[in-house]
């Protein structure tokens, strides 16, 4: 069972928070990237990613479940037909939050939340390349494995950075 | 309702306010344009984060 969110709701009441997050999700799928406060972006991310997961399944039941949050049929159609296929290979992490610093006026920390558009970096390709030389040269294994693992790890961290 | 019994002296007021301090903002140099920016935040002058264009430059 999901743990309830701690602290106050956005907008003051649970109903208002649901409305705020539904509107933010609609705008995100409509425009691809939206600028909002950090707190709202952080609350929006899990909701939006769950909606995209439903969109990737793509059947009528999931479409009806998404329609309970995103009320705009045009946006839901765009989500199911255009956004979901671009994420077919991506195992989660569909959105990216970049902090933009304090807003003029009330100094609220702002952030940009966007649908990740970049190609997914294939992480698995680096691993066989690192493991392949090790069985071929068992004598040099001790000398080679730390060097071979280091680039693989570096490549993995880079891939993670790109996804994040 | 609880109310103050005595007027607070200027000295006590100022002693309390002497603890109001502003902390300097941590800054790093942007890898793209070298201008100072806040860490983990997109550069306000060139609009990049991790060399990726995030926003339009403000200036």
Image (cartoon, rainbow, N blue to C red):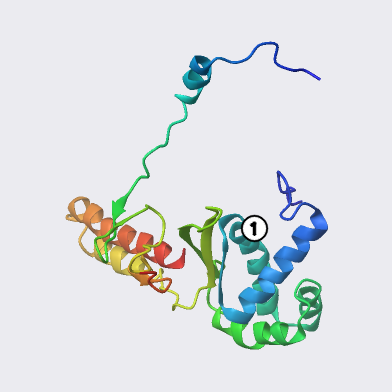
* Horizontal side, residue A35 vs residue A4: left or right: left
- Quarter-of-image position of residue A60: bottom right
Q: How many numbered discs?
A: 1
**Residue A45, how many percent across, how many down?**
61, 63
> Vertical placement of A5 versus A91: above or below?
above
B23 and A129: which is toward the camera? B23
A102 and B15: which is toward the camera? B15
**Residue A118, how many percent across, how many down?**
44, 77
Tell me what residue is drawn at x 33 percent, y 58 percent.
A153
Q: Around disc 1, counting alpha carbons within 10 Å, would you say few (fewer than 14), some (14 to 19), or many (20 or more)?
A: some
* Horizontal side, residue A130 vs residue A111: left or right: left
A39 and A4: which is toward the camera? A39
> Vertical placement of A146 versus B57: above or below?
above
> Vertical placement of B43 versus A107: above or below?
below
Tell me what residue is drawn at x 44 percent, y 24 percent.
B18
> Vertical placement of A157 versus A29: above or below?
above
Q: Chain of mark 1?
A: A
**Residue A49, how many percent across, how many down?**
63, 68
- Quarter-of-image position of residue B9: top right
**Residue B27, how many percent across, how many down?**
32, 49
Tell me what residue is drawn at x 77 percent, y 71 percent.
A69
Q: Which residue is mark 1?
A: A43
A12 and A76: which is toward the camera? A12
Q: Secondary structure at mark 1?
A: helix
């Amino acid at each position: 069972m999901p743990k309830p969110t701690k602290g106050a709701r956005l907008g003051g009441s649970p109903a208002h928070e649901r409305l705020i997050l539904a509107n933010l999700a609609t705008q995100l799928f409509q425009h691809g990237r939206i600028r909002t406060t950090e707190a709202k972006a952080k609350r929006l991310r899990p909701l939006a990613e769950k909606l995209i997961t439903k969109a990737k399944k793509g059947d009528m039941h999931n479409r009806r479940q998404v329609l309970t949050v995103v009320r705009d049929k045009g946006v839901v159609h765009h989500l199911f037909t255009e956004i979901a296929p671009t994420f077919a290979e991506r195992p989660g992490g569909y959105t990216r939050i970049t902090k933009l610093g304090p807003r003029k006026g009330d100094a609220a920390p702002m952030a940009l939340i966007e649908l990740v558009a970049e190609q997914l970096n294939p992480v698995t390709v680096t691993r066989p390349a690192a493991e392949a030389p090790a069985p071929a040269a068992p004598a040099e294994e001790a000398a080679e494995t730390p060097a071979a693992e280091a680039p693989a790890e570096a490549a993995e961290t880079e891939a993670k950075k790109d996804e994040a | 309702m609880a109310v103050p019994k005595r007027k607070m002296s200027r000295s006590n007021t100022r002693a309390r306010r002497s603890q109001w301090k502003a902390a300097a903002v941590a800054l790093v140099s942007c890898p793209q344009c070298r201008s100072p920016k806040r860490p983990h935040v997109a550069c306000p002058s060139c609009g990049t984060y991790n060399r990726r264009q995030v926003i339009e430059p403000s200036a």
